[in-house]
Image (cartoon, rainbow, N blue to C red):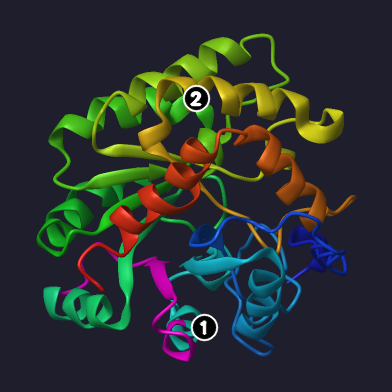
Amino acid sequence: MNPSEAPLCLPPRPLAPIPRPLPDGTVDTHFHVFEQGAPLATPRSYTPEVRTLADWQAYASAANIARGILVQPSVYGFDNSVLLAALAGDPARLRGIVVLHPETDRAEFRRLDALGVRGVRINTRNKGGLPFSAIAALSARIADLGWMLQFQVRPAQLEEIGALLPALACKVVLDHLGFVDLDAADAEAQLSKIQRLLDSPFCYTKLSAPYRLTRAATYAPFGAAARQLLASHPERLLWGSDWPHTELFDQMADDAELIELTHGWLADPGVARQVLVTNAEALFFAGDD
């Protein structure tokens, strides 16, 4: 494979001191790990830097993150072995979102549930991700387990998700505010689509990866969007670090800065606890304690 077809991601920056760690009980609902030698899918959208569970645990300790949701990255396709090994390495703290063929038998779903898996990811943005055609079969298989469908999509697909919601027998989570383009002239209209989806009691989205939604300094448009959604739908919002920030090739985000900005966006302590702790515990860890 030509390396130019799958560029190498920048590594995360060395972690700077974090002046204000996150509140006790914080759940990081979106991160990835990558192991040396694990087979990568072809074709793929990027080539990851190796960053292991131990690396995330060091970040989580510095940031005061209590629990995490490990998300299957597109570069591993249907091979969830790296994710499952990580879940086994920290089973009390971690749950997982996998990628499965829609015809996977129900016994395998039950096995994965026992290992800490709590959902399946639909990814139409990256090479190697599951398409919308998998939704119907997957929704039927995960309903009894209480799993969710997690979507990484383009903003143009938000209306399609809205049309699908009434027929789905599971909850839905949108990665990274549905990838709305906060620098676009129609940013407010795109954000309104997110708000309409969040009107459903079955739909959630993540306040995560601001560097994917805006090029502005200190991600000011993302902060404004976050405050708008926090005012209208705090019970439908989750927080995720998006560590180790894949698909960044020119400039790497700073974790300490992102955490400090998060404190600013979640200035109200009650709302901060709801988004950082309560919503995620109810969605991913209900019945586990």
Residue 270 drawn at (x, y percent): 47, 38
Number of numbered discs overlaid on the protein picture: 2
Residue at point 53% right, 35% down? 177
- Residue 264 in sight: yes
Crowd tier of the residue under label 2, counting other residues whose Cα lies within 10 Å: few below 14, some 14–19, many 20 or above: many
Horizontal side, residue 264 vs residue 12: left or right: left
Residue situated in front as seen by the camera: 99 or 32: 32
Q: Quadrant of residue 249?
A: bottom right
The amino acid type of the residue labelled 1 equals Val
Residue at point 61% right, 10% down? 186
Residue at point 81% right, 49% down? 257
Residue situated in front as seen by the camera: 35 or 287: 287
Residue under label 1:
82
Task: Indicate whether residue 90 is drawn in magenta.
Answer: yes
Q: Going by the picture, which residue comes out furthest to the front?
A: 269
Q: Quadrant of residue 121?
A: bottom left
Residue under label 2:
229
